[in-house]
Image (tube, rainbow, N blue to C red):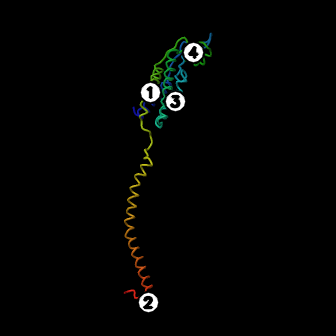
Amino acid sequence: MTRRSAVIAALICGGLALLALGQTWVTAGGLQSGPVAGAVADVEVTGNDAAPVAAAMAVVIVVAALALTIARRLGRWIVGGLLAVAGATVTASSLTVVASPGQAASRMVSEATGTTAAAPDHAVTAWPWLAAAAGALSVVVALLVLTVGRRWPNSRRYQAPSGDRSAEAAPGRSRAGQAADARGRPGAAEHGADDESDLDEMDAWDSLSRGEDPTA
């Protein structure tokens, strides 16, 4: 699995969980508002109300997927662990609602009826199952990130070591120095010839001052 596919898979899992959490999970029926009052309409409980912890963890899954795009080696371990915990929490919370719909809907039922009596009838939809599946898939993606992610390349530009750059620059400097030496040799020879001619003229003047013939 590549980094891109892991990010896409985690985003899909988080998106499915958020979609499912926004739908009706439990419908409570057969409600009475009081001993002398009439019946109350059925109460529909969404996943956000039935499993608020799962709703928070679904957001964590999306955030972890986005963080995975820039995470390096240590960061991938942290993000992978966070993704696994969040996915497992979403699955566990969703299955808890399926197992105990009355407890999950109790708060909303109390607000609707004004009593603490539980609803006699509860109908569970398929949305908590979808959220549980999304959480389980998030755990699978997290395990792949922890096992395969260590082979992903880091998202940074490669820079050659300074020693290599110095080694590459050294031949260039050597060639430049050789060229300078080659250019400098003729000039040095000419300068030496000028110095020799200056010395010959001085010797001639010294000979004349002593009364000698410099051409002899």
- Residue 143, disc: 1
Label 3 vs label 2, nearer the camera:
2
> Dot 1 surroundings within 10 Å: few (below 14), some, or many (20 or more)?
some
Residue 45 on image: x %, y %: 53, 20
Tag 1 or tag 4, which sits nearer the N-term? Answer: 4
> Dot 2 surroundings within 10 Å: few (below 14), some, or many (20 or more)?
few
Label 4 vs label 3, nearer the camera:
3
The amino acid pointed to by label 2 is Gly
- Residue 211, disc: 2
Q: Which residue is mark 4?
A: 40
**Structural distance between the alpha carbons of marks 4 and 1:** 47 Å
**Which SS class for mark 4?**
strand
The amino acid pointed to by label 1 is Leu
Tag 1 or tag 3, which sits nearer the N-term? Answer: 3
Q: Which residue is mark 3?
A: 60
Residue 19 on image: x %, y %: 48, 27
